[in-house]
Amino acid sequence: MKKALLVLLILLLLVMTVPLVVPVPPLEGTVPPRELADPDSQFIELNGVDVHVKTSGAGEPVFVLLHGFGASLYSWNAVMTSIAENGRVIAYDRTGFGLTERPLNWVGENPYSSEAQLQLLWALLDHFAMDKAILVGNSAGGTLGLQFSLAYPERVQGLVLVDPAVYSGGGAPTWLRPLLNTPQAKRLGPLFVRQFLAKGSSLLDSAWYDPTLIS
């Protein structure tokens, strides 16, 4: 029994300490977001985050385009001009995606949380002096559009959901979430995300019935 407890103690110490000393090398070959931006790109600071935005059209109504998980405002390139024939269109990269800033350190609300996403959308509406907007959301962007509509219905003129990610019990299991907020998990987080990105192409292929249709 004593040997078993000793082994368990050693394993526990390894689990707690090894992640904190695992090297996280800097990414190579990266360039500033503005070097990757298009001529019509804008960068505006919202809630302390440098946000990549594109606009088109004018007048009313105003459409705000919300892209899905792992995507960016590039998702809307093929339809943005057509939508702009009916009013003003604003598309932006949500925090963690596209060319929008990815904070590594912060004080207060986690900028990647659902609540922070709601507040960022609110700040976007304020920045462009919009009392209301039609929210157009795809996949996880549809989730955000629904959440914003429920929290702030007075600021939503309409809601367009394009294959929204609407389901119950989503995200990490409740019992796992405290572990994800530990220093160990935060240390390993960048390494896990890099693995996800490295396999992004194969994951995209697996999401399509006919991968040859992916442009």
Image (cartoon, rainbow, N blue to C red):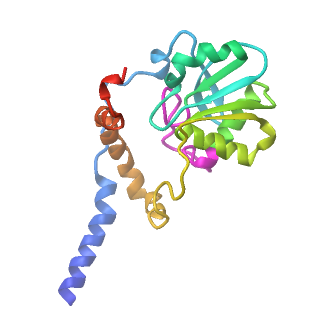
101 inside magenta stretch: yes
Q: Residue at horizontal 56%, vertical 18%? A: 79
Q: Residue at horizontal 60%, vertical 34%? A: 137
Q: Judge whether residue 56 can be spotted in this image.
A: no
Looking at the picture, does residue 89 appear above or below residue 162?
Answer: above
Residue 11 horizontal side relative to residue 90, left or right: left
Q: Quadrant of residue 65?
A: top right
| 102 or 165, nearer to the observer | 165
Q: Quadrant of residue 70?
A: top left
Q: Judge whether residue 76 can be spotted in this image.
A: yes
Residue 45 horizontal side relative to residue 194, left or right: right
| 187 or 150, nearer to the observer | 150
Image quarter where the N terminus lies is bottom left
The percent coordinates of residue 161 (x first, y second) are 61, 36
The percent coordinates of residue 12 (x first, y second) are 30, 71
Count the labels in the image: 0
The percent coordinates of residue 129 (x first, y second) are 79, 26
Q: Quadrant of residue 205?
A: top left
| 201 or 108, nearer to the observer | 201
The percent coordinates of residue 17 (x first, y second) are 31, 62
3 inside magenta stretch: no
Residue 154 horizontal side relative to residue 70, left or right: right
Image quarter where the C terminus lies is top left
Q: Magenta part of the protein: which range?
A: 94-116
Main SS type for the magenta part?
loop
Q: Residue at horizontal 31%, vertical 43%? A: 24
Looking at the picture, does residue 62 appear above or below residue 35?
Answer: below
Residue farthest along the top direction in this orientation: 39
Residue 102 horizontal side relative to residue 60, left or right: left
Q: Residue at horizontal 49%, vertical 16%? A: 37
Residue farthest along the front direction in this orientation: 209
